[in-house]
Each structure stands twice: as C-alpha cells, then as structure tokens.
Image (cartoon, helix red, strand yellow):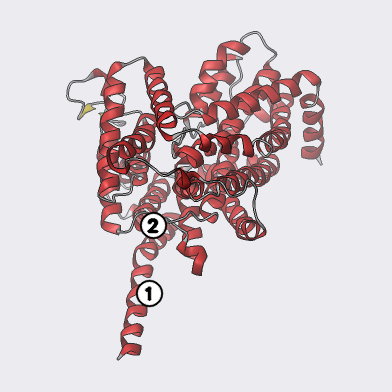
Amino acid sequence: MDIFNALMAGFATAVTPVNLLWALVGCALGTAVGVLPGIGPAVAVAMLLPITAKVDVTASMIFFSGIYYGAMYGGSTTSILLNTPGETASMVTAMEGNKMAKSGRAGAALATAAIGSFVAGTFATVVVTLFAPYVADFAVKLGPPEYFMLMVLAFTTVSAVLGQSSLRGMTSLFVGLAAGLIGMDQISGAARYTGGKMELMDGIDIVLVAVGLFAVAEVLYAAMYEGKVEESQNKLTRVYMSKRDWKRSWPAWLRGTLLGTPFGCIPAGGTEIPTFLSYATEKKLAKGEDKAEFGKSGAIEGVAGPEAANNATVTAALIPLLTLGIPTSNTTAVLLGAFQNYGINPGPQLFTSSAALVWALIASLYIGNVMLLVLNLPMVGLWVKLLKIPRPQLYAGILIFATVGAYGMRQSAFDLFLLYGIGVLGVIMRRFDFPTAPVVVGMILGPLAEAQMRNAVSIGEGSWMIFLQRPMSLTLIIIVLAVLIVPRVLKRMSKSREEAAGA
C-alpha cells in the first residue's frame, strides 16, 4: 500500500501541465533523435543537458526520461527503413525489419516495433515500481564469475544463430573481440594496439562501428555491387498489421518482455544479450513458412521479439541506476551525470532522501509510454513515405547523416577515416557472407568479459575452478554447452533418420 500511495503522489506531480509539457517535448525530441542515424540517446541527453540548467529538478528528470524512452522508440525506425541503427540496441531489429521494408511490409514492421515497445515498456515499468529494491538485492549477490558466463552465453548465441555458417559467425565475433582490445587496459591502464594514435587510447567508439558496418557499408555495397535497384523493391503494400501479423507478434512481444526485464535489472549492462537471445528464440520457435521468412523476406517475429526485449531492458535498467547508482549503458551514465548536476546521488538511500522525485520519475514513465504510442502509431504512414525517396538521394542523405553524426561526437577527422574504413570492412564482410552483428557484440562485451574474467580468477586466487564452484555460473556453463551441443546433436539425429528412411 505504501508503494501505491507513493506512486499516486508521483502521478500527482507528473500530471501538472508543466511536467506533462516537458514529458511531451522529451518524447518528441527523443523520437526525432532516435530516427537520426549515428546520434543515439546518450548524445541527445548530453547535448540537451544545458537546456535544463535552470529548470526545476523534477521537470528536468521527466524531460530526460522522455528523451531516453523516445530515442529507444525512434531507433527502430531507421533500422527498419534504412538498415541504419542509431543505437546498437536497434541492430537486431534491422536484420529482419529492413528485409520486411524491402518486401513491402515496412508499415507492419514499424507498427509491431511501436506496440512491442509499449507492451514491454509498460510491463518493465510495473516491475520497476514494485520490485526495484528487491531485485537490486538479488543483483548485488551476482559476482564476476556469473557476469563473465552471461557474456559467454551471449557470444555463443550470436555465433550459433547469425549467418549461414557458425564458422563465419565465430570469425566475425573474434574480429569484434580483437577490436575491443584496442585502447587502455581496464585493469592495468596500459595502452594496447593503439599504434601510437592518441584517438585510439579510449578504444574505437561503438556507435562509430555500428554506423560504419551498417549505414556506410549499406551505401557502398549498393553503389559497388547492386547497380540500379528496381523501384519495385521498395513497394509498399499496406501500412498496418494484418490479422496474421497480430497472431505472430503478440507471443513474441511477451517472450521478448520476459527475456529483457531480468537483464535490465542485473547491473551487467547492455541490451545486446537479451535482444540476441530473443532473436535466437524466435528463430528456433518459428515453423514452416514463418521460419522460411527469416533472412529472406523478413519475419515479423524477428522485429517484435527483439524490440520488446530492448525496451524492457532499457526500462528495467533504471533499477540498478536508481537503487545502486550503477549506470548500465552510455545513456544511463549521462542520466547519472544529470542527477549529480542537481546534487542527487542515486543509491540505496534515494527512495527515502528524494522519494518525491523518484516516484514522479516512475509515474512519468507510464505517461511517456502512452504518449509515445500515440505519437508513433499515427506516424507509421509518414515514416514509410521515406521509402518513396529515390535511392541515390536517400543514400546520399544516409552518408551525410552518418558523416555528420560521426564527426559530431569528437570533432575528429580521424573518426571520419575510421568510419569509412569500417564501412569498407562491412562491404567485404557482406560480399563474402560474414554476419556483421557479432563484430559489434564482440566489441561491446569483449572488454567487459575480459575484466570480469580477470576479477573472477582473482577471487578464485588464480584457480579457474571458481566458475564450477558457484551454482549460478555452473548453471550458465551448462546452458552454454547446451546451446553449442544440442542443436548439432539434433541435426545429426534428423540426418541419420532421413538416411535410414531413404535406405
């Protein structure tokens, strides 16, 4: 009852006209920024920090939460229409969503992404409301061995599911892991593989890699190999979801939500693990003609599940931020900075020291979710009109946005050379059928996995048995082995049966 009363007090604060206006502006700005390739929510929040310097603290937090949410909603738009993720979280959505757009189902893809985001965001907000302190208590008990095995699970899932060949998937993953080693060692602080370039001391920016591998590579590949693309490839048959689309989407929304929420609660960081796990789950569960659409004309489950998992994770990530003061992404790190600008320190005492602010923020998430659904669904038709832009002008626009976005991060010409170098690598990988997504996952999780592995071995006093001695990490090892072995055993058995039947 105390939680209910506190939430009602939060709604009373959040629904004042001024705060509602800030929520609306934040949602609209966040969606607009999410649509721009190369400029993610972290950059948006950082750029807009000075605007609210003299605004009431509650209004500014509501404004930032609107941007935070809106950018995640908007990130799926360019992923689906242009195959250009503005954030790594939208990367998985691009794989099936862009194929749906090219086969004339862009409207259905955008609609399922928006509704899935609403369902997942609302569910995760309820979890934040009810269970924040309790989930944080459990998350604190996980140590480096568990975090390392979680990341190994992500690596095996990515390499096993993406692409036509597991070997190619693993090769792409190791390229990403190698690139993730560039920069300063997280433990010792020594520079590694920088070639004497100061710009590489902090490593290669992940947004740069995502934009280069997806946006720039898409444009260069089209220019070099596709020649004149027939306009029929961009046909649009309908704007909204059919009855069959609804039937296929709602189980994926629920599965994605249930996968994403726990990952957001754990302060290990990143939406990559749940989104890839969701994609893997949907691909495994699909049957018949639904399964045949994966990687070809685009399967709607491959958009609905990962997008729901992404938004559930993003919302639930507020639990470690508010209760532990641990930011699990670039955006939550900037939000933490925004809190500290106002002299507020997120942590176990926040729910007592700044209760009114926290509950107003949580209430604004419910309001923002509804606002974003109302904003996004009617605009599906408008976004789909992007497909009517002639290809040369559209590709030129993508290159301009990608270049401006990359240069705007650090105002560095070196970043531009790096961006186009990564774009050329993306073209080569696409030409020889190497999946590009594992590169990004390897880059993001590689340094984290390395640090957690070294910490885990230190806890075990140099012994690797630490991973077998802890129940949670042992369970994760068994799951990893199952992911690697079970599909191959089943495939071998089915092949033996076919040979026996043929004989």
The residue lying at 40 percent from left, 20 percent from top is: 404
Q: Is residue 380 left or right of residue 400?
A: right
Q: Quadrant of residue 369?
A: top right
The residue lying at 61 percent from left, 10 percent from top is: 53
User: What's the mark number on residue 161?
Assistant: 2
Q: Alpha-carbon distance for marks 2 and 1? A: 15 Å
**Mark toward the start of the polypeptide (2 vs 1):** 2
Q: Quadrant of residue 64?
A: top right
User: What's the mark number on residue 490?
Assistant: 1
Q: Is residue 18 left or right of residue 344?
A: right
Q: Is residue 19 left or right of residue 65?
A: right
Q: Is residue 345 above or below residue 239?
A: above
Q: Secondary structure at mark 2?
A: helix
The one nearer the camera, 366 or 362, is 366
Residue found at the very far top of the displayed protein: 54
Q: Secondary structure at mark 1?
A: helix
